[in-house]
Amino acid sequence: MTTEDIYAKLLPIIQTYLPEDVDQNEIKPDSDLTRELNINSAHLVDVVLDVEDAFAIEFANEDMESLRTMNDAISIIQKKIN
């Protein structure tokens, strides 16, 4: 699965948890999930659960700690599926 494929599958998951005040068009690969996209910690857990289901992977505690940006999520997913 390419980076672009992962991004395309990840984007709608992230968009589901965006607050109304965040423009979905502002999501970039380097967007910080909590600071720029305002996804709260409870929703971040939901994002991880949805990602685990969508990609048939499991996030370890270390993965959760390193999850800050869209690129981080893509990197973690790539490592898990390869």
Image (cartoon, rainbow, N blue to C red):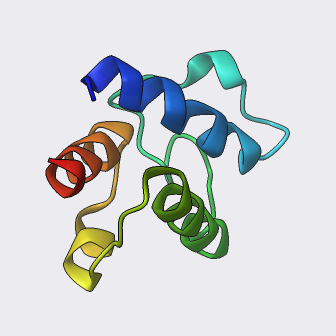
Q: Give the image location of residue 13, x and y in percent.
A: 63, 44
Residue furthest bottom in the image: 61
In the picture, measured across the screen, residue 43 lies left or right of residue 58, that is: right
From this view, report whether residue 33 is shown above or below residue 58: above
Residue furthest right in the image: 20
From this view, report whether residue 45 is shown above or below residue 79: below
Image quadrant occupied by the N terminus: top left
Residue 74, quarter of the rendered image: top left
In the picture, measured across the screen, residue 36 lies left or right of residue 67, that is: right
Q: Give the image location of residue 36, x and y in percent.
A: 51, 40
Residue 45, quarter of the rendered image: bottom right
The number of discs equals 0
Instruction: Residue at 50% x, 38% y: name it.
Output: 10
In the picture, measured across the screen, residue 36 lies left or right of residue 2, that is: right
Instruction: Residue at 28% x, 37% y: name it.
Output: 71
Q: Give the image location of residue 40, x and y in percent.
A: 63, 65
From this view, report whether residue 69 is shown above or below residue 43: above
Instruction: Residue at 63% x, 68% y: name it.
Output: 46
Say which of 82 and 14 sits in front.
82
Instruction: Residue at 34% x, 54% y: name it.
Output: 68
